[in-house]
Structure formats: structure tokens, C-alpha cells
Image (spheres, coloured by chain):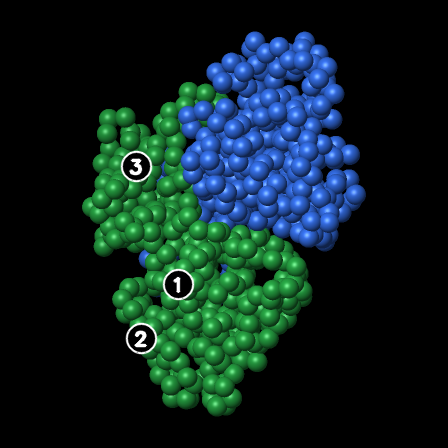
Chain colours: A green, B blue
Amino acid sequence: MKHKLSLLPALLFFSIAVIAQRPPSISSPEVHPDHSITFTYFSRKAQKVTLNGEFLKATVALTKDTSGIWSVTVPPVKPDIYPYSFTVDSVQIADPNNTHIFANERFKRSIVDVPGDQPLIHSLQNVPHGKVSYRYYKSGTLGTTRQLLVYTPPGFKANGKTKYPVLYLIHGGSDTEETWTKVGRANLIADNLIAQGKAKPMIIVMPYGNVRPSPMPDFTKDMVADIVPFIDANYPVIMESKGRAVAGFSVGGGQTLNIGLTNTDKFAYICSYAPFTTTEEFQKNFANWSPDANKINSQLKLFTISVGTDDFLFESVKKNMAMFEDKKIKLKSYIVPGGHTWMNCKHYLATTLQELFN
Amino acid sequence: MKHKLSLLPALLFFSIAVIAQRPPSISSPEVHPDHSITFTYFSRKAQKVTLNGEFLKATVALTKDTSGIWSVTVPPVKPDIYPYSFTVDSVQIADPNNTHIFANERFKRSIVDVPGDQPLIHSLQNVPHGKVSYRYYKSGTLGTTRQLLVYTPPGFKANGKTKYPVLYLIHGGSDTEETWTKVGRANLIADNLIAQGKAKPMIIVMPYGNVRPSPMPDFTKDMVADIVPFIDANYPVIMESKGRAVAGFSVGGGQTLNIGLTNTDKFAYICSYAPFTTTEEFQKNFANWSPDANKINSQLKLFTISVGTDDFLFESVKKNMAMFEDKKIKLKSYIVPGGHTWMNCKHYLATTLQELFN
């Protein structure tokens, strides 16, 4: 991980002065060359500390040394980025010594990056990098100012001579506008695919998709009436459906279907990742849906749904795929191993990004 | 706070399916119109939950209802942004229901924003907003690729016809490159002061300042040899000392003195906030320092040191002020109430930002 600590007397002095009960300097997690990982936690008082991680089938216990340092080394895991947390007695926590936090509204977990022997598609590589900008836009629909993130590709020219296509990319329920970069590494995946000539230089807009109580009709309005016009006004973009894609994961995958399929004049590319489609709203929108399949098929250049066979939504996603087939909507399905995870989600993005704007 | 939750059956279903042991939907913290605040935490198993906050003189206990919901309401506090955490039995944690986390490598705390009756200088106001971009640069000095954040002001033109001055703004020890925006709200302070005509439109560069084991000589080199050239090459900036300022807090305040005073040909503005100057390196650089005061005073347009009277570094900072005075270096000192906190730090920035590039 990036922010390793060493025993620096001066900083320790500073730390002790500022925060009482300062633990000893700990580096956690430590990923070893063989892809095994050591996790470490400090507590003199805890009775029991366990590790929960998406690379584990079951939680494992950490053991304590005489100084209060708890640790465990797990055997080599498949290179990827994984969420994990500790449970200290009854309290689930993010790893206090790891700055890489899973951006989410409901749980506090950390992420560990296990690099591959060959660089993985989401890794920081020696290629030109785009940038990710945090911006505010006014949502007339929601009556508030919201934040969104905008990835602009390497070599981006703001002068308007080049017009860029735009992917609107939506996080899962209870995630935030930062989850696609901090956990999904969408920016690095795009950097790497663009460098390899496998994806077109594009702008990627990552809004905050949570709208309560109803994630769908209001966010669809926000997207069409507020977010797209904000991007059209502030970036040199292709202002036609052939220059716009919408994609999203989980609840965001459901929002993607709702936004895309009700606005095929505005988005020619729809990529839904493990969509959560059992909300009442979704049912209402699609249960008695009588689409003009010919028209939609001629408007869309790409419509994909990706899902893992171990995804708890697999059966529901399959039903939706059958529904679209039944209604004669042309659909490309990606059924792969894996569960309802951000490991899979990164894979869905890396696959479909190569099919956009061709 | 931005991300409030309500009881949405569909999302709850989703949540339960994904994460076992899901607590009930909780909104914490809740700031009331009279500036009192209710903090809430869910645990059926905890024996004791306390609140630690920089608005409190001592920790306060939360009380549990029969369903396992712990809460406490603290009396009205002075409007500001404060760090806080819970201690659940023996475990200190960030508030799991609050996405606003204090960006730091060592501790996990949350932040609560208590708005003023009149908008505070760090608040999101109805003014034009700049943007904050996350970028990578190659550090030849440190032999790695590092991230930095770049604030560009509202109406920023990349076409090169306007040349902007640049403030290089450094966080405290164990903070990260995100602390100045996520806790210090440097971008919103700049937006508001620029809108009021009190600060010049400027670029603000927020690097990651931690270098181990030695925060000073190596980061000074990184700043001069890598960061400044990266900005000069990628932004339309004034490439002279009169267009460059360096500022920083705590360990970053010490780095600021080291960077600025050893490079007065490159930075005409030096603003040090509650500097931590008792490192061996700092002592070595300044103990036997024989500056050419006339030259430095003619090169610098502004040299300030800010500190609070309750700061644990107050005596050490006063000694440094006396040292500079003794060496005839022109210094403007800001001594104000308050401690070694980000509440004070925001205030130092808001004050000195108005004096830059005039």
C-alpha cells in the first residue's frame, strides 16, 4: 500500500502529543511477493480479533503477541483488489493503519491491492495518465448542489477542436461518487486500455447516484435534465446519442437500464453490470413494458448485461435477460464466474469499455 | 451531512443480502438548528460507547435503548467542522454511518459540519466553483509515481492566455494529499474568497508531503525538482517567484519553512501554519543558519507564521519567531486563540489566502 510508516522519532513525538493512546507504528496490510498477505492490528485490551475479507471463505483469527500486536498471514491469494475488515470483539472496523478505504455510506472496510506478476488492468502503470476532477453541479431535479467526478483522458484538449464521447458510470447502492475510482479504479483501467489502443479516449462521468427514497425515477431525471447538460456545457463532447454511454453496477445497474432504455435517443450504449432490478420502481417500469423493439435496436449500438454465476442476483438477472429477449431487444450477455463483488465489477468495466464508441 | 439514509425496503433487502449483520438504518450525526448534535451508533453487544470530539472538553457516554441503538445529544457547539470518533468498549472507530472521514494515515475519525447562521467561509455557497483534479506525477527524487491534487479556480482558462499564480499547500504529518480538501475545505475557502473579490484567482497544488524517514530534505527536493516543474509543464502559470507561494500545517508548516527559506528565488510567499520545527532535520537546517537577511527580505513579498495560543507547539513556534526576528528576517505573525487543530488551520488559510499575489 502507498502510505507505509516507519519508526520516525520526530513524527512519533508529534503523534503522541496530538493523540493520546497512540499505538506503535504498524504497517498493515503487507503483501508479500508470493501474494500471501500479513494483516496487523494493535490492541492491548481486545479479547478477540478476526479478519473478514472477500478473498476468504471464512473469517480467520489474528493472534496476539505479548506487546498487544495482533497479526495473521493468509496464504497466497489471486492478484486483485479486495475489501476486508477486522472484527475487534464485537466491533467491525476498517484497518486503522490503511488509508485505502472502501468509499461507502453504510460500512467501513479497507481495501488491499495484491499486484499480479504481470500488471493487472487496474494497476498504476507507466503510461500516460488522465485526471479525475471533483466538481459541483446544480441539480434542479433534486433541488441541491451535488458532487460528481469527471475523468478526462491522457492528452485531453479543452480547446473544443476534439469532441469526446462520454461514459456515464454509476456506482452501487450505498456506494458514493468516489467508489468507481477508489475501489473500481475506473481511471486506471481507462488509462491502460487507452494506452494499449483497446479503448477510445473518452470522458467518464461518475455521479453520486443515491436518491432517497426512490433511486430510479428521480435519478433518471437528474441524469437527463441536470448531469448530461452540465457535461455538455462544460466539456467538448459529442452531443448525440452515438457519443454517450451509460453503465452502472448493482443498484446502479438497475438505474442504467432505466436511464438507458427510456432514453435510447440520448444514449446509444447501455452496459448494465449485475443489475439489481427487484425494486418496485423497476418492476413498475418494466413489468408492462411494450417497447418498439425495432426502433430501440436501431437506436442502440450496444446493450450488454454482465453477471457472475455466483452473484446473489444471478437468477434475477437471468430472468431480466429472458425478458429482454422475449421482447426482441438485442442484448449481449456476459456470464462469467464470480459473485456480486467489485472484483467482478472492474472486470465488467474493462470488458465493455473496449466496445464503446467503436 | 450529505448522505442521509431512510428506510427504503428495496435497498434494505439489497443490503441484507450483501452484508450479514446489517444494522438498522441510522442517520448520524444529525446537526439540529440550534447547533446541538445527535450522534447515534448501533450495537447490541457493546457494553460501553463514548464520543470523543474536538468540540468537547471530555468524552461523553452514549446511552442504549432496548433495540441496541446508542445515542447522545451534545449541547449547541460553535459552528465549524470538527473531527470526532466513537470508542466502542476499547475500540476507537470512525462513525460507520458518516461518509465524511478525516483523511489520515494513522487514525480513523469522522468529521461533522455544523453550519453557521451566516455561511462560514469554508461552506458550500451559491458561488462559481473551481474544480479539484487528482493527478499523478513522476517523482525522480523519490523514484516513484505520486498523486497530487490541483485546484483550478472558477472560470479557469487552459488556453494559456491567462497565467495563474500557484499556491503549494502541504498537509500535516500523517495526513494525506486529500486532507486539505476533505477536512480543510481549501477549495471552498478559495471559491468563496475569490467570489468576494478577497483572493486572487489562483491554482492550489496539494501534494502528498510524507516522505519517510526524513520529511524535509527529500520533500524539499521533490517539490523543487519534480512538483513545481510538473505544474509549470501542465498548467498556464506564472513561472517566477512572484507567482509562487508555499504554505503548510504542522509538519507541513515545518516543510514550508524549509522549502521556502532555502528557495526564496522560487517562492516569494511563505505562509507557515503552526509549524512543527523540532525535528532534527529542521534544527540542523536552521540552528547555525546565517541568512543574508537583506536579500531574503527583498526577495520575499510575504512571510507569515500563524499559531494558536492553546497549540501544544505554541512555545516552540514563538522561539522560532524570535529566531527569525533575531536574524532580521521580516515576519508577519498571526497569534490567535485555539489549538493545534484543523479548525484553526482553515482559519490560517482563509486569512493568508487574502494576502497572496497582491
Residue B43 image position (x, y, % from top left): 39, 48
Tell me if residue A108 can be seen: no
How far apart in space, not on screen, are marks 3 and 2 (Cα)? Answer: 38 Å
Structural crowding at the residue carrying mark 3, measured as other residues with C-alpha within 10 Å and reported as few (<14), some (14–19) or many (≥20): many
- Label 1 or label 3, whichever lies nearer to me, is 1
Query: Looking at the image, is mark 3 or mark 2 earlier in the sequence?
Result: 3
Q: Which residue is mark 2?
A: A315
Judged from the image, the secondary structure of the residue bearing numbered disc 2 is: helix
Residue most extreme to the left:
A75
Q: Residue at x 42, y 45 (%)?
A: A100
Q: Which residue is mark 1?
A: A350
Judged from the image, the secondary structure of the residue bearing numbered disc 3 is: strand
Q: What number is the disc on residue A40? A: 3
**What chain is tagged by disc 2?**
A
Structural crowding at the residue carrying mark 2, measured as other residues with C-alpha within 10 Å and reported as few (<14), some (14–19) or many (≥20): few
Residue A31 placement: quadrant: top left
Residue B313 image position (x, y, % from top left): 57, 20
Amino acid type for the residue under numbered disc 3: Thr
Judged from the image, the secondary structure of the residue bearing numbered disc 1 is: helix
Amino acid type for the residue under numbered disc 2: Glu
Given residues A186 and A250, the one toward you in this image is A186
Residue A62 image position (x, y, % from top left): 24, 39
- Label 2 or label 1, whichever lies nearer to me, is 1
